Structures are given as structure tokens and as C-alpha cells.
Image: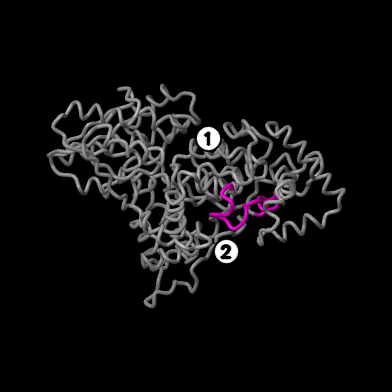
Amino acid sequence: MAKLIVILGDQLSPALSALREADKDDIFLLAEVKQEASYVKHHKHKIILLFSAMRHFAEVLRQQDNKVIYLDYEQGFSSLSSAVEHCLQQHPKLTGIMITECGEYRLKQELDSWHETFKVPVDILEDDRFLCNATMFAKWADGRKQLRMEYFYREMRRYTGLLLDSKKQPLGGQWNFDKANRKTPPADLKAVAPMQFKPDEITSEVIKLVAEHFADNPGTADNFCYAVTGKQARQAFNHFVSEQLGKFGDYQDAMLMDQPFLFHSICSIYLNCGLLDVRWMCQKVEAAYKQEKVAINAAEGFIRQLIGWREYIRGIYWLLMPDYKTRNFLNAERPLPGYYWHGNTKMRCMQQAISHTMTHAYSHHIQRLMITGNFALLAGLDVTEVTDWYLAVYADAYEWVELPNTLGMALYADDGVLASKPYAASGAYINRMSNYCQHCHYKVKDSTGDDACPFNVLYWDFLARNEQKLGSNARMQLAYKNWHNKAPAQQQALRDKAEDYLIKLDKL
């Protein structure tokens, strides 16, 4: 009684539940389909990564004597459903479909229709590559007035036992060392690049395909250097632990000119498509701390991102979708400026973050939150356009992780579900955490002059135009006190400058 085992492009893991449950007569399907490659204008690197990793994964399955159907992009299948229909027609003795649950709500709707569409049993298995399933998260969230990540993270530490002593208390004496992750980078700080990989024959074929069929997508196809197999991804992560993790702890939030990676692992790219396992990664980092190879702020800071923030974000997504996607608490509707797609702006911080994004399909979390996200928040950019942009341009972006991070954390469009206040900041924050301002056309200490920093100008305007909605927020009181302490003439000058900048937003 053979089944069709469908494996998605972000499920390239030997630990996948559908693989564990498969029988020797089952047939595996991997398909490069137009809908999944085109529902947003994905960065070329993301498409290359997934198509190449899928092809390599299929080869591993074949080497293990599995029956594999691989449908490449040029075979012209429009959707995953059309690929499944083709397989069922070609193999009429297949008695059902099995698949591990997907990571995006729009695709879940498609999978949920398969039983009726194909008239065969469809078994959708839990994705237990994650530590916290939807039921577990809903139980944690039930009855809570606020769904704060910090308290969820502590529960996950207890659940996993990571970085706990024999009495189940946090190693280092506290749960969170976030304040020790924010050191200002010295000018002579030397970055350590993540491991790169030369494209093999399979990847080179995919690069040609993407260059031909996705020529208008962001990025270029000829500088791809990411891991595309589990073995390579593990090598890349081991390199991070031995060479980068120590400095990552101190400079997790830092930014420097022409340094797109600093000490970041970029392994979210591999983890989110299945090439790495979160448990293995955390154990490696915990071992490095216990062996005194890295400090507690490095180990805890990294593990917090994985078992805290990543699992929390996924829980929020599945708890609140589909309504979550439509939220726009601050009524942000201004069109996305063109430089989000090319980086040609006089704002040096935006130029750096966006150019890194377009070159590598990557920028680290502070560049996403406090540069491109902060600017979108301050300028009131359209929530849907901004979330679609983040989903398109990053190689680690899938809606379950991208949407809450962007809509909730960066844009505060969910009215505080994720963040207790908007992550709005002026140029002073950027100046403290980077050397961008030293190389900028605009003056970071000016708010009303001809070359005033747009972040300064728009910060005050953001407070003023949103005071009715944000003025009662306890964590915003100091900001509003500073605003109200300004003389009426100064307030008007700031609002006038902001209006001027918003009118010529595309030319900043």
C-alpha cells in the first residue's frame, strides 16, 4: 500500500517526520513549482539555495535506495497540487499522501484541500523539528494578558534543560544577558566571515536556471556561496562556534561599514530550510560554554535566538493567523520607496543594510529591525508592502518567521502583541551601534537643518502623529515627555521638516 511522500523545499532534513514514517514502497516527491518560486519576488539566492538543496537532498534519498520523483522547474508545474496530481496519475497504485505540516498559512489551505481534490487519504504530520508545537504554545498563551517572549523563553530553557545548573537555575545567575550583547563596536574591530562554498555541478546548473527564468528578481546569481547540503551546513556552523561565537556575544547588535556579517553565523538560512537541526546547534553552543571556549553572554545570546525567539515567533504566527496578517494598528499606508530594492540612498545606514541584502540575501537582525524596519515604522510605510519585501529579499524568510518579526516587532502593526512598545529610534541609536553616521551625507546630531538626519526628523514626527494611540503606553512616557518639553516653535519646525522629507521620501 504505497503512499506519495511529499517533501517541501524547507523540509530538507533527515529528521523530518514524514521521512521517519515512510515505508520502503513509498515514493518521495520533490518539486520546483512556479507558485512557490513566485508568490513574492524572491531574491535569486533564495531560489538557488532551495532548488540546489532540494536536488542534493533528492540525491541522498536515491543513494539510500528510496524511490524519488523529482520535478524540476523547467517541467512547468504551476503548483504543488499540480505536481501531486501528476504523480498520482503516473502511479495509480498509490493509496494516499503523507506530508509534514507546512510553514505558511497560504500553503496550509492548499494542503487541507487535497483530501477532497484527490479523493485519497492525506496524512499531515506534525513538524517536530521545532521544540514547541502549536498546541503546546496555545496552552502556554492561554489566559495570559501579554504574550512576552522572555517568559516563554524561560519555559523553553526549563523544557530543554539548556544552560541550567543541577538545581534547574540558569547558569551565570540570570536568564538573559541581552544587555551584554550590545557593546559599541570599536573602529578597528575585525570581522570573521562565515564559511563559504564553491558551487558544485548541481548548484551551477541551478544558477544558470535562475539567471534565465528569474532575471528580474532581486540580487545576482553569480556570487552564490552558501551551503546546499546538510554536511556543508554543519561545517559552516562548526566554523561559527569555533571562530565567531566568542565575539558574537559582545557585538551581536553591532554594525560596521562594509561588514555584512561581522560575527553572525548566517545559519538561520540553513536552519529554516532543514539543513541544520536546532537541538544539535544548541548543544554545540552549550558545550562551547561549558568547555570555557566562549562566555555566557555569547552562548545564552545565541540559544535565546533559537529556543526563545524563533520558537516564540512561530507560536505567535500559528496562534493568530490568518487575521494577524491584516493588522495595521498605526494605519501605515505610505508606498515603499524605490531604494528598498536597490539601496541608492544618501542615508548611509539604509544604503549599507539594503546593499548587503541585495548582494547576499542577508542582513543581520539589528539591520532588519533598527535600520530598514525602524525607517519603515517612522515613515509609516505600507505594512503589506514592507512585509512582502522582507519575505522576498531574505534567504531565511518564510512567512511563519518573517511576518511576526516584521508586522509585529518592526512595525508595531499588531498593537503590542510582540513588543511592549514600538521599536522607534532616532539616529542616536544608529550612531551608538555603528560607524555608519561618520560616513553619511546627513548629520546625525541635526533634526531641522538642510542635512538633518531623516531618522531624527521622522522619529519626532512619528511620536506626534501617533500620540493618540501611543501616548498612554507606559514605556513611551519618557519619549512623550521629551516631545512635550520642546517649545511649540521647535515642534512645528520638526513637523515641517518631516513633512518635507515625507514628500520627497524617494529622494532621501
Q: Badge 1, how many Cα within 10 Å: few under 14, some, many 20+?
A: many
Q: Quadrant of the N terminus?
A: top left
Answer with the quarter of the image where residue 123 lies. Answer: top left
Write down the quadrant of residue 36 in the picture: top left
Q: Nearer the viewer, residue 402 or 226?
A: 402
> Where in the figure is residue 442, as x and y percent of width and height?
74, 41
The amino acid sitting under disc 1 is Met
Q: Is residue 217 above or below residue 227?
A: above
Magenta region:
413-432
In this orientation, which residue lies closer to the viewer: 166 or 204? Answer: 166
- Residue located beneath label 2 in the image: 179
Horizontal relation, residue 452 to residue 435: left or right = right
State the quadrant of the C terminus. top right
Q: Report which residue position mark 1 lands on.
A: 358
Query: What residue is rendered at 34% in x and 57% in y?
Result: 279
Q: Measuring from the top left, give residue 460's x and y in whole percent.
A: 74, 49
Q: CA distance from mark 2 to mark 1?
A: 30 Å
Q: Is residue 425 magenta?
A: yes
Q: Position of residue 496 (x, y in %)?
A: 81, 40
Query: Nearest the camera: 484 or 202?
Result: 484
Disc number for residue 345: none
Above-or-below relation of 179 to 334: below
User: Quick one: SS at disc 2?
Assistant: helix
